[in-house]
Amino acid sequence: MSEYQIDTTRRHVFLNGLFRYFLRAGIGAVTGAVASLFLPCPSALAVQPYDTILNPVDGETYSAAVTVQFLAIDADSDFCTATVEFSKDSGSTWLTATLSGTSVISNLYCPTLGDTKTVVWLSKTDLPDTITSRVQLRIAVADASGTGPADTTQNIGIDNEKPALVTGVQAVANLSGAETGVYVTWNTSAAPDSSGYHVFRSATTDSRLSSRINASLLVDTRGCLDTTASQGDSQFYYVVASDTHGNLSDSSALWSAPNVDVVKAVSADSSAPTGRPRPGDTVVYSITVRNNGYAPAKGVVVYDYLPANTVFADSSTAASAQSGWSIEYRVTGGGGEDVWQTPMADSATMVRFTRNNRMDPSTATPSDTLTLKIIVK
């Protein structure tokens, strides 16, 4: 009896369910036959793809553009299409996730051993100004045979909430002797996750962010020195707070560094000998402030350093308390921190004059001239 083998290199399936096969007798002629026999072909069985989410990680918090990675696997090594969805209600409702323009979710090659795919979820588009710890992502992969089982994350956090608006922004000229430099100060952000600030400068009152003066995030601070600003020019400053996830607050309310001229004149006390001051002599500083702008100036503040080898005179408070201005002295407090106080102390290193009312555009009046007495050591 001859030995026969089934040749399945060619498949012919008939509607009556019969399978035509060829009987090959050794290496002789091929004889065809039709039998009432149904033989399923293993390679014709459909195998659906599946995936495993690698990122984001359960329990972690993300913001804005979230990198999503998943391992896509298909036993048939087909090209597949992925769907990415998110849920805000523990899986009761699923919404299509908005992905970046560079994210590819179709025609994905999914080999038998799997391949890692990466897309970017624009969470700020789907969940704007939101902070929550209960968001889930779901990814399913499909080929021509159908959609495989989806993989779902546990809860992840999303923080797209903007920090509160920065308040109390002020800008004053640097009076250390240079012709450039403006001090910008503001109130510390109340946001518990505040990580720092960005400061922008503009030559106009346009609220759009213009030129950023800080090269990197200003961390744990409430002020900075803009070393490139020219005194006498109109400069407008905006401060933006950043949180630990990179969310930025809206631009701060507009405060201008008014177009204010500060002129400081120095003269020896009339009782002192003429010529260069000597130790023990009293020197009087006369500081004149003038608004050269076209609008009233708000919150004008003038700082003046104590020159080296000098101390404030005992009469500084009385001599400097001009009409419309208040005065504070900077001393070193506990822990080495700077403290502003009204009483003058021997340890004072700087004085701050604050205008208590607005300054209208005009020539300087007597009340706009501040005097300060110091004693040479």
Image (spheres, rainbow, N blue to C red):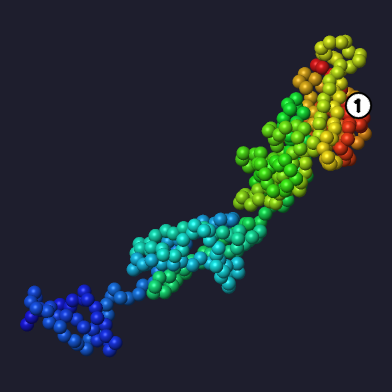
Local crowd at mark 1 within 10 Å, few (<14), some, or many (≥20)? some
- With 224 as the anchor, is 323 left or right in this view? right
Q: Is residue 285 visible?
A: yes
Pointer 1: what residue?
A: 319
Q: Quadrant of the N terminus?
A: bottom left
Coordinates of residue 78 in the picture (x, y in percent) = 36, 67
The residue lying at 80 percent from left, 38 percent from top is 258
- The front one of 108 and 247 is 108
- With 190 as the anchor, is 40 left or right in this view? left
Q: Is residue 188 visible?
A: no
Q: Quadrant of the C terminus?
A: top right
Q: Place residue 232 in its image quadrant.
A: top right
Coordinates of residue 239 in the picture (x, y in percent) = 71, 45
The residue lying at 87 percent from left, 10 percent from top is 274
The residue lying at 44 percent from left, 59 percent from top is 117
- With 52 as the anchor, is 319 left or right in this view? right
- In the image, farthest residue toward the front: 294
- The front one of 98 and 158 is 98
Q: Place residue 332 in its image quadrant.
A: top right
Above or below residue 19? Residue 294 is above
Above or below residue 302? Residue 373 is above
SS under mark 1: helix
Total labels drawn: 1
Coordinates of residue 55 in the picture (x, y in percent) = 49, 58
Q: Amino acid at mark 1?
A: Ala
Coordinates of residue 137 in the picture (x, y in percent) = 53, 64
Above or below residue 18? Residue 73 is above
